[in-house]
Amino acid sequence: MMKVTHLLARPFPPSPLSRRVDVVVIGGGAAGFFGALRAAEGGARVVLLEATQSPLQKVRISGGGRCNVTNAATDPAVLATKYPRGGKEMRGALSRFGPRETMAWFEARGVRLKAEPDGRVFPTTDDSATIVDCLLSEARRLGVEVRTGARPSGIARTQEGYRLALKEGPLDARAVLLASGSNPNGLALAASLGHKLVPPVPSLFTFEVKDPRLDGLAGVSVERVRAKALVGSETFEQEGPLLVTHWGLSAHAVLRLSAWGARAFHDAGYRAKLVVDWLPDLPEPALRDRVLRLREHEARGTLGAHPVATEIPRRLWDRLVEAAGGDPSLRWGEVPNRGVQALLDQLKRSAFEVTGKGPFREEFVTAGGVDRREVDWRTMESRVAPGFHVAGEALDVDALTGGYNLQCAWTTGWIAGSHLAQARS
Ligand SMILES: Cc1cc2nc3c(=O)[nH]c(=O)nc-3n(C[C@H](O)[C@H](O)[C@H](O)COP(=O)(O)OP(=O)(O)OC[C@H]3O[C@@H](n4cnc5c(N)ncnc54)[C@H](O)[C@@H]3O)c2cc1C
């Protein structure tokens, strides 16, 4: 039964601290809050432990401070393709609580959302604080006891559930939700209960590339390229925008390659060969015809003044011409046959050496975590330790950019919370 006090607003942290509750949630991120709120709504007495002084920090910085809450795509089969790890499991989970339900959840609590043309969903305020404030006020309304600066140093099974070791003394719970993201301390708690961990590696990173063709071009972007990464013995291919940065290459084509190839990149020390097709919509024979036509009809015009395609920014075109052994001041009529071939090679398969992972930038997630097979995805309950649940990035699940990572946190947090509500005394 839900206790009346759960419905009263009260500040964090309540005093005195509880020593025995129905549910302990470890981690105050998106997944932990969603799990805690859902369990409390179902009548469970919930304590949420957050190691830092400020919960929901990643939500706050997400989407460049705007918080890309979810994606407007709602078909679980389509959504599942956005998860390089966990797509199969997420498909079922998303059919229970997906973007539609997430949006309805926030809107029912007064948060207005908007979808951008590319499908990303943000609060209409364009401010992640709207989402953070909603979650914090819901936690107050439902009487979730949020303890900050609280990091359990150990977990042990008891007859009634679990005992967590905290510096102020033990905390007993009938059930536990681990939602500590990729933090090694949190994952160590799962391992101590017998869970197998898939080693965490970064996903969604940019590429460090040092190449004269890119020097001084930081900020130049191409709307759509096809990029192939040869990493160790594996090959990954993706399409999308490409951006030249101060240290190499970024934007969706690169982020998608980094996500699908996350483990291969890690194993190869972030060294790879990247082959870029700058004009993926133009088959090579058609491109060759276009080049030959330019040579014939613009014989007196220069390569610099008559680029082969408007899709390629002028400064980049000049560099590709130079890399092909030419010069932007060269007249089209002076281009020899081998120059035509060299130009086609640059346009259709510019090869770059990736020498590392770019520094932390806009979006960053971790692949790896608790093995997906060790969790029952209908409840998020561990198959190894009954009563122990796992949600969010603590699982070996990660997604491409577009709101899918937070959606994983909302979905798995909600499913776990629904099951945890049954732990109410
Ligand atoms: C810069 C950036 C921008 C992003 N933008 C987006 C975006 O716009 N859209 C999107 O979908 N995804 C985005 N992501 C990814 C998304 O934020 C994460 O996938 C999501 O927040 C994961 O939620 P979580 O609750 O599982 O984990 P986390 O958000 O990592 O939360 C875990 C919490 O647990 C706490 N914790 C850790 N260990 C312990 C412990 N032992 N005891 C107690 N507490 C502990 C941590 O302090 C943290 O508060 C972004 C990520 C980054 C880094």
Image (cartoon, rainbow, N blue to C red):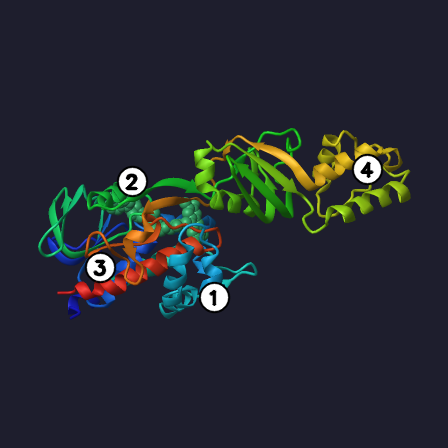
Mark 4 or mark 2, earlier in chain: 2
- Point out residue 195 in the picture as x, y percentages from the top left corner: 25, 46
Residues under labels 3 and 4: Cα distance?
A: 67 Å
Residue highlighted by disc 1: 75
Badge 1 marks a residue whose secondary structure is loop
Q: Is residue 90 left or right of residue 326?
A: left
In the image, 226 versus 66, the foreground residue is: 226
Mark 1 or mark 4, earlier in chain: 1
Residue highlighted by disc 4: 303
Badge 2 marks a residue whose secondary structure is helix
Are there few (<14), some (14-19), or many (20+) residues within 10 Å of tag 1? some
Name the residue rendered at 86%, 37% in the picture: 332
- Point out residue 115 in the picture as x, y percentages from the top left corner: 51, 63
The residue type indicated by label 3 comes to Val
Residue highlighted by disc 2: 184
Residues under labels 4 and 2: Cα distance?
A: 55 Å
Mark 2 or mark 1, earlier in chain: 1
